[in-house]
Amino acid sequence: MSLSVELFHTGGRYPQLLAEHLSQAGGQPVVEHLLPAVSKLPMMIDDPDEYLPAGIGGADIAIAVHLHHDLLVELPAALHGKGAKALLVPIESPDWMIRPGLSTQVARECQRYGLESAFPKPFCGLQPGTPVIAQFCDEYHVGRPELSIEVADGRVARATVVRGSPCGLTDWVAERLVGAPADDTLVARAAELLHLRPCLATMILDPQLGDTIMHESIRLIEAAARNALSTAEQPSRPFSSPTGRGAEG
């Protein structure tokens, strides 16, 4: 069975997509914890435990989506000793890490309590840099998008997601690449599809990137399409892949 996942969030479409896709990809339900929105909490929280739900930390992977900074800093201590092995903090908007140095502070707390940590910006930029997070990426086929395509008669006959966005957008794009011309226009088509669902990363300028996080997600899917095109297979037998998920026409 895949590593178990629990999701801490404040509601909205993005965590809903994460829960749906990861539950399907991992073959087991993601446990969700709904916390108060940042706007409904005081600027400084004296007692974070007051707002953190009981019974947390039983899953292997904890994912924290846009939590109040004081709750996020407290989360590694709250997870300690309860089975959690890693904390992932995706950043889809600069205001999700509004305090300078917050990710460094949380990473230090994770290290203190024996948790792996990562702060991917955006979540589809997740890299398998430590053992448990690498296992999560492998089992759930998530991380920096990687596609494999099969070509027949100059068009995409099948597209397989080796790794993709935890929200499921890479899978959505791959399904709609089937039938597209297998030429340089495929890269632009992948980027266009990213807008159509659409990607929920922000178009607010991120000072660290010097660009928007949405544009970073576009670059990632464009790179995946470009690499898939350069290594495309010509079918000689029914396509099968031991890893990843495929769509075909």
Image (cartoon, grey):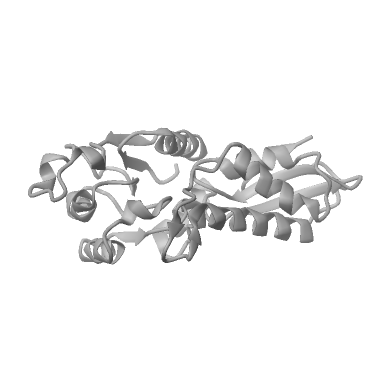
| Quadrant containing the N terminus in the rendered view | top left
Q: Quadrant of residue 116?
A: bottom left
Q: x and y percent of residue 55 in the render?
A: 19, 37
Q: x and y percent of residue 231 in the render?
A: 77, 60
Taking depth in this image into account, of 221 and 149 the one nearest to the observer is 221
- The residue depicted at 54 percent of the width and 40 percent of the height is 168
Q: Is residue 50 left or right of residue 204?
A: left
- The residue depicted at 28 percent of the width and 46 percent of the height is 67
Q: Is residue 175 left or right of residue 184?
A: left
Task: Check the image and report above or below for 188 versus 55.
Answer: below
Residue 194 visible here: yes
Q: x and y percent of residue 174 in the render?
A: 67, 43
| Quadrant containing the C terminus in the rendered view | top right
Residue at the extreme right of the image, as rendered: 153
Residue 240 visible here: no
Taking depth in this image into account, of 209 and 102 the one nearest to the observer is 209
Residue at the extreme left of the image, as rendered: 46
Number of residue marks: 0
Q: x and y percent of residue 175 in the render?
A: 69, 38
Q: Quadrant of residue 4?
A: top left
Q: Is residue 39 left or right of residue 233?
A: left
- The residue depicted at 33 percent of the width and 48 percent of the height is 60
- The residue depicted at 40 percent of the width and 58 percent of the height is 132
